[in-house]
Amino acid sequence: MKSIQDCEARKIDKLLNFRLPHYAKKIGWILCLLSLGTILSLKFIDGDWTILKVILKRLILVSLFIVVLAREKVEDERLQHIRAKTFSLTFLFSAIYILIQPVINTIVGSILGKEQDVFQDLGDFVILWFMLVVYLTFFHFAKKRD
Amino acid sequence: MKNTIKVERAILDLTQGELAERIGVSRQTINSIEANRYVPSTVLALKLSAIFKKPVNDFFMLTEDD
């Protein structure tokens, strides 16, 4: 039984310590900027771009996820500590955002007289986008400060 | 927790970068430790101890807050 527990613990540790190579960070940012640029430029081009927009939105999430998973030049214990702290903060902020944002939408919707906004759930894209951006922002500043 | 790593480093005439390279961390990590912003793990403390050839207690001290 103990060996099974040890094996599971090792697997979890391996998963937690999984990082992409440092150059993946650059690839992630380039992909993200290209996708964002394409989405923005589609606004000025006539046509039905619904499917392409869905694909590009997923690509933005994947590219940001690649940036999150990419290792730093020197990935040491201090950075692992900062990552752990940042993951906790991201979870906390996301939970608060997910709980509060529909209420704010409802209040703003009722003030502006938009009935369709009442208690509308946040989409998966908005939630994941928020989590990834919050993580990257916190990580960037914590890296500089700590 | 406070430390005298900066002094120990000066005794050995090492830069932050050189010390960082010897124990396999980044220069920023050494800077954070020296500024008491980051408390290193036991493994890192023992690596520092091996470099300085002194027990950990000689350059890491508990403060009243600890």
Image (cartoon, rainbow, N blue to C red):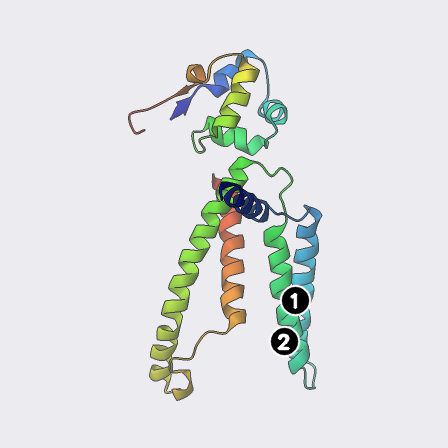
Identify the residue shown where x is 63% and y is 62%. Answer: A62
Identify the residue shown where x is 67% and y is 82%. Answer: A49
Answer with the quarter of the image where residue A115 lies: bottom left
Q: What type is the residue that disc 1 sits on?
A: Leu
Tell me the subunit letter for badge 2.
A
- In the rendered image, which residue does mark 1 sit on? A59
Can residue A144 be spotted in the picture?
Answer: no
Is there a contact, CB below 8 Å, between mark 1 and mark 2? Answer: no
Whole-Å distance between the Cαs marked 1 and 2? 9 Å
Answer with the quarter of the image where residue A96 lies: bottom left
Can residue B60 be spotted in the picture?
Answer: yes
Q: Is residue A100 above or below residue B22?
A: below
Q: Position of residue A137 (x, y in %)?
A: 51, 53
Mark 2: give few (<14), some (14-19) or many (20+) Cα within 10 Å: few
Q: What type is the residue that disc 2 sits on?
A: Val
Identify the residue shown where x is 49% and y is 20%. Answer: B6
Of the image marks 1 and 2, the number of the one nearer the N terminus: 2
Q: Position of residue B28 (x, y in %)?
A: 55, 33
- In the rendered image, which residue does mark 2 sit on? A54
Question: Which label is found at residue A9?
Answer: none
Residue lying at the far left of the rendered structure = B64
Tell me the subunit letter for badge 1.
A
Q: Is residue A132 above or below residue A17?
A: below
**In the image: residue B29, left or right of residue B22:** left
| SS assignment at label 1 | helix
Mark 1: give few (<14), some (14-19) or many (20+) Cα within 10 Å: some
